[in-house]
Image (tube, rainbow, N blue to C red):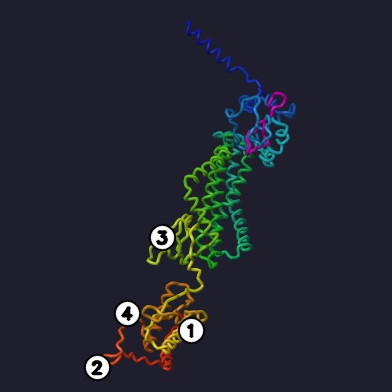
Amino acid sequence: MKKFCLLIALLSVGLFAQKKEVQPDLSNPRATIYTHLYFLQESSFDKSKAARTIYGLQGAEAEECAIKLKQILDGKGLRVDINLLPSNPNHLDTLNGFDFKSKYVLFPNQMPQVYVEKINDNWYYSVETVSHVDDLYRQVYPLGTELLKTSIPKVGHKVVFGFELWQYLGVVVVLILCFVLFFVFNKIVFALLKFIEKSLVRFAHSSLNESLQKLSRPIALLLVFYVVESYIPVFQFSLDVNSFVLSGIHIAQTVFWIYVFLQFVNVVMDIYSSYALKTESKLDDQLAPILRRISRGIVIAIGILKMLTIFGVDPTTVIAGASIGGLAVALASQDTVKNLIGTFMIFLDKPFQIGDWIEGGGVEGTVEEVGFRSSRIRAADTSIFTIPNSKLSEIVINNKGLRLFRRYNTTLGIRYDTPPELIEIFVNGVREIIDKHPDTRSDSYNVEFVGFGDSALQILLNVYFKSPGWAIEQSSKHLLHMSIVKFANEIGVGFAFPSQTVMIEEFPEKKSLDLKYSPDSEKANEVLKEILKDFPESI
């Protein structure tokens, strides 16, 4: 019996607690906002109590303002989390500016005009909020929304699966309209892009058409999404539905914006590549893929940050986290950052081009590729040197690929017993060979008798080959050497080599050594004509 009486007492207390009325409370930001939203719910609707949160208006005006404010939040799909609201009666706004005030902004990013503030020990929706309610309502609800409410017949308000019939019909009409708008917007956007291409980018190649089509479609879809977002409040869905639909639209918009900017990067890089192909520098061609990768990375990173804010992450927190994370990554990968900076220094200074023969830091070879982190240099034996760009930008580089001419300097050693007349004939003949050589500079060379070596008379040969290419230089040397050797052989000039010759002036029944040199200028000229006759026009 005692247990039964106790159970009856507990049930009585529970029923009394349920019947206890919620009274308006304006003591802190949480209480004021809760009072406003609670008394505009279907189960607890009392617009007069909700109107107490409006400052500066009375009666019907305050009630209408409170209702419109709730409709604005519902139409934008902005859900207020009561548990996150401050309950401190002396709350100060420390997030919006340096002038700390007793106010609280509900949605600083989406709707900064809507906030509550402390007035005479109570919290109300501010005078600024009240003054902006009508403007915000017109922005959220397009023209004709009120007319639509009154013009729909009773049968249209029949509820099926939680939605009214006219809402189903409206969704179908909007979907059809979206398809039509997409095709129209796509044509208009593509025409505008083509006009911009012809007006500003005259050097773009014809294959840019495909890139522009890829760019126009997502832009057209974005425009359709913005139209749909503007007219979603017309359907007067519940807060849950509006929040779900608008969140989906915002996610889709972010995804398409990422796609648009990625395609824009492709278009810009295509234009740059076509321009780079027309320049003499091959380094510009290497810069295009690097810029493409960096730009795409930046677009994707910004898109991810934007996506996080859609899911409710505070943008300030995201930016701060990205900054701290970026600093941590930079500290952990200093070498990568140094190489990246070195890459930009190489592209800015342009100490060499693709295909140049460079020498420096113990490495010599042809530059094949300048990458994002390192560069590839092919040595003469066809092996590959991979050098970090940070080191390549710091070492002293001898760019032999920038030589205007290739200098060749050597010494011809002829025998000591060569007569002076024959030496003169030989020197003049070599000069003539250089003059007629197809790949030597005839205005800058030296062929002179310059000294006496240990075992030979030294003839200086200093020439400049016109072609800076290594392979052509070797062919040019071959033709020059063969011509000199043929000429020397025909006129009787012998090339010396390290040796000792014992000269015997008198010996019984032996005659002295006589090499029988016979300098003959006419013969030398005939030999030269025969040699020069076989010279090609170019190497």
How far, Cα to Cα, is label 1 from label 3? 40 Å
In the image, taking residue 272 as reference, residue 336 lies left or right, namely left
How far, Cα to Cα, is label 4 from label 1? 33 Å
Q: Position of residue 294 (x, y in %)?
A: 52, 53
Tell me which amino acid carries mark 3.
Phe
How far, Cα to Cα, is label 1 from label 2? 50 Å
Residue topped by disc 3? 385
Count neighbours of disc 4 (C-alpha within 10 A) and say few if under 14, some if 14 to 19, many if 20 or more.
few
Q: Is residue 123 above or below residue 382?
A: above
Residue topped by disc 2? 509
Residue topped by disc 4? 499
Give the residue drawn at x 40%, y 65%.
379
Q: Label 3's element?
A: strand
Q: Residue furthest left?
A: 509
Q: Label 4's element?
A: loop
Badge nearest the viewer, 3 or 4? 4
Count neighbours of disc 2 (C-alpha within 10 A) and say few if under 14, some if 14 to 19, many if 20 or more.
few
Q: Position of residue 381 (x, y in %)?
A: 37, 66
Residue topped by disc 1? 435
In the image, taking residue 424 as reference, residue 221 lies left or right, namely right
Tell me which amino acid carries mark 4.
Ser
Q: Residue furthest top?
A: 1
